[in-house]
């Protein structure tokens, strides 16, 4: 069985009595994903092949069983070498289980062994086992860790998508049934899942730090930090603001944004690019980000007299630190000096991201991948 989504690289194979060696003809390989089980191998990587820089992949049902735990791969500047340990010593008449040999699968005559050849030099020894035995363990560990990383990211994004889907569904369903009378109680209807999802988003700050995702730490820090301050310091901390209509509209904006953001991230975990999902992810924000910023500004403005009255988060003199802090003054300064620049900065960043992502999706080769 072969994959039909992306172009196939040329794959050269050879064997001896105990191993099968695959040589994938790709240069400058990035993000290789090699998955094997007892009778199946799947490969995907971005590199320079017969069709230039592309995402290449292939998939094969093997002619006989292998031992996944004893199989390994390594990446060089010119190719990817995969060594598969046969479950039973012997010679395979062919590599794949199908009677039809794919056009991109070829015999590696330089390394080919037959039953009549002297088998003292093992195929794995000639190429991969020139390195010490620890290299095999490290390769296999990285193999499994990469799969675990992708599984974790997919599950995380799926979980967040389901969480915000629930929040959005509750808001829309109850509003459609109760009407305007529901708005004052909207926050109380969804505040537990909303707070949980927001706390979970703190993980997005650590993902680029630990190399789980690419990109800067600054973007998730600003977005997650800003939302957390609005939710926990301005909404959760002051009950009187919770019944205002602006809270309903803000939560609705946040939820709709995430309904398109997390599906996009789920597809990118496995390097898939679905044009419509990408377009939605980088288009829906255009009306929703300004509306969300406006709602946040109104919440800050409406909260100033409440925090003046309660003194919450403020520190007055005298105290043992000889330090004073007036939270409502900070809120006023943010609205006067930082609110519009922050909104402009975020909108400019998203506009550049949109141009970059949608330009890539319009590339002919990527469009072909998308259609397939």
Image: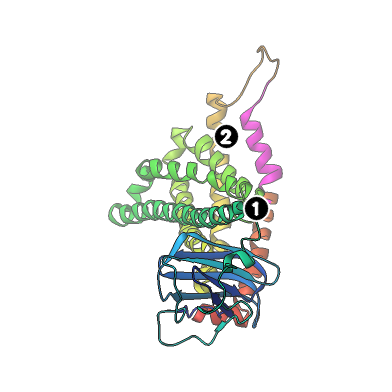
Residue under label 1? 343
Q: Where's residue 252, x and y in %?
A: 44, 53
Q: Residue placed farthest to the left in the image? A: 177
Marker count (numbered): 2
Magenta residues (range)? 324-340
Q: Quadrant of residue 289?
A: bottom right
Q: Where's residue 242, x and y in %?
A: 43, 39
Q: Say if residue 297 shows up in the picture.
A: no
Disc 2 secondary structure class: helix
Q: Where's residue 52, x and y in %?
A: 67, 80
**First of labels 1, 2 by sequence position:** 2
Label 1 and label 2: CA atoms lie apart by 20 Å
Q: Is residue 113 above or below residue 77?
A: below
Q: Is residue 332 magenta?
A: yes
- Name the image quarter holding the N terminus: bottom left
Q: Is residue 152 above or below residue 369?
A: above
Disc 1 secondary structure class: helix
Query: Mark 1 touching mark 2, by CB under 8 A?
Result: no
> Badge 1: few (under 14), some or many (20 or more) residues near its Cα, within 10 Å?
some
Residue under label 2? 304
């Amino acid at each position: 069985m072969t994959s039909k989504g992306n172009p196939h690289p040329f794959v050269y194979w050879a064997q001896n009595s105990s191993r099968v060696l695959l040589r994938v003809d790709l240069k400058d390989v990035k993000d290789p994903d090699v998955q094997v089980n007892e009778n199946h191998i799947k490969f995907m990587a971005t590199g320079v092949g017969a069709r230039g820089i592309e995402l290449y992949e292939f998939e094969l049902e093997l002619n006989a069983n292998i031992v996944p735990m004893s199989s390994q791969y390594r990446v060089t500047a010119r190719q990817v070498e995969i060594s598969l340990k046969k479950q039973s010593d012997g010679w395979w008449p062919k590599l794949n289980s199908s009677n039809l040999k794919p056009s991109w699968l070829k015999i590696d005559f330089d390394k080919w062994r037959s039953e009549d050849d002297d088998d003292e030099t093992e195929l794995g020894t000639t190429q991969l086992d020139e390195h010490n035995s620890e290299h095999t363990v490290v390769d296999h560990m990285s193999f499994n860790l990469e799969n675990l990383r992708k599984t974790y990211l997919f599950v995380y994004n799926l979980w967040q998508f389901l969480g915000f889907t629930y929040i959005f569904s509750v808001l829309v369903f109850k509003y459609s049934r109760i009407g305007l009378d529901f708005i004052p109680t909207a926050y109380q209807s969804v505040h537990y899942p909303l707070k949980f999802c927001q706390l979970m988003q703190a993980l997005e700050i650590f993902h680029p730090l630990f190399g789980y995702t690419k990109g800067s730490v600054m973007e998730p820090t600003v977005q997650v930090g800003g939302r957390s301050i609005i939710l926990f310091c301005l909404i959760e901390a002051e009950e009187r603001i919770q019944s205002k209509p602006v809270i309903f509209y803000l939560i609705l904006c946040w939820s709709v944004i995430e309904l398109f953001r997390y599906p996009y991230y789920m597809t990118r975990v496995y390097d898939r690019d679905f044009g419509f999902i990408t377009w939605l992810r980088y288009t829906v924000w255009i009306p929703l980000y300004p509306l969300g910023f406006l709602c946040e500004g109104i919440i800050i403005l409406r909260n100033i007299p409440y925090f003046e009255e309660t003194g919450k988060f403020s520190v007055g003199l005298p105290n043992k630190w000889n330090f004073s802090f007036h939270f409502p003054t900070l809120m006023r300064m943010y609205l006067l000096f930082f609110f519009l620049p922050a909104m402009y900065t975020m909108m400019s960043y998203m506009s550049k991201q949109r141009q970059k992502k949608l330009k890539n999706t319009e590339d002919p080769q990527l469009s072909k991948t998308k259609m397939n």
